[in-house]
């Protein structure tokens, strides 16, 4: 009798999903203070980030076609025929086999979420590890998968959720440019290395 190889693969996927749950991170959180209003706003942002994290994990678990995969960010696709536009909550469509961008807004409509806003009324941003894109051309996802995304020098990050906070000096919104929502090194386009830092600080 042949060994049941699918069970081994499912175990690898489950292990990876547990790792995914532990590593899914939030950047640019509002700095906490003793001010009750600031604490309340920070709590609201934390709740929004938690809901978004749960939705991403549920999406990764529920994908029968490519378990563990995640949708592209929402930023680049502008296709009236397919009713897909930047900042509409829908995941970008693939350009050949790649996401047009691995940094953009969280695709909340694709994830069947209410619009996720931080305490400043800005939609959450989202960075995705390229190896976890939901395309058949990508390598199978298991405990050996290198996501291609780093946080504070640590590899293996599945995705990042980012609460941009209020605009800083020199940032203009509305915009589709990361420099208008993120700070310092975190705003450098589609780069894969990110730094954790409180909102309003210089992430360099």
Image (cartoon, grey):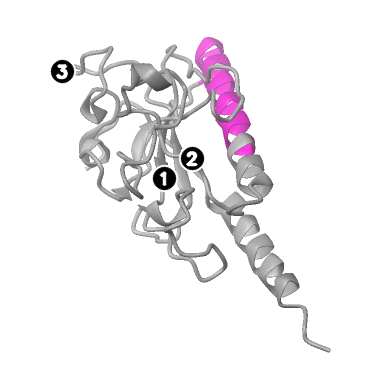
Q: Residue at x 34, y 38 (%)?
A: 103
Direction from residue 173 to residue 67 in the image, left or right:
right
Q: Is residue 84 visible?
A: no
Highlighted range, magenta: 34-54
Q: Which mark is residue 12?
A: none
Q: Quadrant of the C terminus?
A: top left
Kindly indicate whether the residue at mark 3 contacts the one at mark 1 (C-beta within 8 angstroms).
no
Secondary structure state at the residue bearing disc 2: loop
Q: Is residue 25 visible?
A: yes
Q: Position of residue 19 (x, y in %)?
A: 59, 58
Determine the CA span between mark 1 and mark 3.
26 Å
Q: Residue furthest right?
A: 1
Determine the CA span between mark 1 and mark 2.
8 Å
In this view, 115 is above or below 182:
above
Direction from residue 115 to residue 93 in the image, left or right:
left
Q: Depth check: give the residue in front, 168 or 81.
A: 81
Decide which of tag 1 and tag 2 comes sooner along the chain: 2
- Residue 124 in magenta stretch: no
Secondary structure state at the residue bearing disc 1: strand
Q: Which mark is residue 170?
A: 3
Of tags 1 and 3, the one toward the viewer is: 1
Residue corresponding to mark 2? 71
Q: Count every numbered label the image shows and give the total.
A: 3
Kindly indicate whether the residue at mark 2 contacts the one at mark 1 (C-beta within 8 angstroms).
yes
Q: Residue at x 43, y 27 (%)?
A: 163
Residue corresponding to mark 1? 128
Crowding near the residue tagged with mark 2, few <14, some 14–19, many ≥20 C-alpha atoms within 10 Å:
many
């Amino acid at each position: 009798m042949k060994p049941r190889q699918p069970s081994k693969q499912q175990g690898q996927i489950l292990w990876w999903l547990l790792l995914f749950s532990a590593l899914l991170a939030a950047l640019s959180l509002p700095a906490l203070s003793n001010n009750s209003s600031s604490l309340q706003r920070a709590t609201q942002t934390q709740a929004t980030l938690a809901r978004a994290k749960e939705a991403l994990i549920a999406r990764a678990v529920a994908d029968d076609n490519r378990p563990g995969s995640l949708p592209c960010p929402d930023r680049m696709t502008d296709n009236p025929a397919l009713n897909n536009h930047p900042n509409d909550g829908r995941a970008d469509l693939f350009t050949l086999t790649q996401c047009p961008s691995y940094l953009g807004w969280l695709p909340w409509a694709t994830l069947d979420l209410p619009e996720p806003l931080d305490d400043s009324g800005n939609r959450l941003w989202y960075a995705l590890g390229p190896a976890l894109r939901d395309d058949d051309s990508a390598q199978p996802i298991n405990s050996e998968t290198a996501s291609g995304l780093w946080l504070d020098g640590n590899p293996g990050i599945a995705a990042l959720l980012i609460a941009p906070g209020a605009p800083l000096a020199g940032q203009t919104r509305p915009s589709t440019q990361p420099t208008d929502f993120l700070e310092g090194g975190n705003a450098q386009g589609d780069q894969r290395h990110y730094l954790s830092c409180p909102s309003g600080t210089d992430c360099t």
